[in-house]
Amino acid sequence: MITDAEERDLAVLVKLERECFTSFWNYEQFLYEYKENPFAHIKLLKEQDVLIGYMDYWITFECCQLNKIAVTETCRHQGHAIEMMKELIQSAEAANCETIMLEVRSSNIAAQQLYRKFGFIDMNIRKGYYTDNGEDAVIMAKGLGGNW
């Protein structure tokens, strides 16, 4: 089940963040996102009240920006990321967004393949984007509402 995050969820969210990423947000960053960023949406994917995934995205006028999407390692390859991507697209369409944008590590081929299944295309490369190792990011985008 996908639900909106609540402040009480942030500590366990940080734990999952650290499990899934080498460059990760801390509690204060998630708290800012939750309380202060009017564009942010943090969605949780739970099974029997256990957090197994989440996504963070911004809706700013006509654009949706996917910042984070993660599934705990033990629950990967079971369709959970697909479920979250469907929710993301539905939310962006409901907000009348024209595009969804994201950055993904150039080495994260599995994520790129997932995004392409949903119609995302490669737009550009951000050289040295990731601060933990200087890896490039692939900028991907998807048009909505008949765009592109």
Image (cartoon, helix red, strand yellow):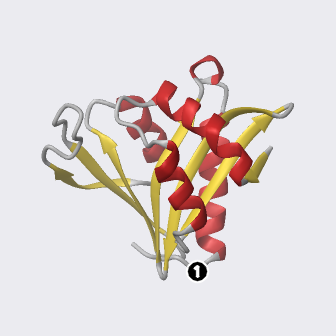
Placement of the C terminus among the 4 image quadrants: bottom left
Q: Position of residue 101 (x, y in %)?
A: 40, 61
Q: Name the residue under label 1.
A: 96
Helix, strand, or loop for circle 1?
A: loop
Name the residue: 49% across, 50% down: 28
Q: Which residue lies furthest to the right in this view?
A: 48
Q: In this view, does 73 lie to the left or right of 112?
A: right
Residue 120, image quadrant: bottom left
Question: Label 1 sits on what residue type?
Answer: Asn
Residue ranking furthest to the left: 127
Is residue 71 visible from the viewing direction of this image?
A: yes
Q: Nearer the viewer, residue 88 or 32?
A: 32
Disc 1 packing (10 Å; few <14; some 14–19; many ≥20): some
In the displayed structure, 47 sits above or below 37; it is above
Whether 81 is drawn above or below 67: the answer is: above
Exactly how many numbered labels are in the figure?
1
Residue 38 location (% of width, % of height): 55, 74
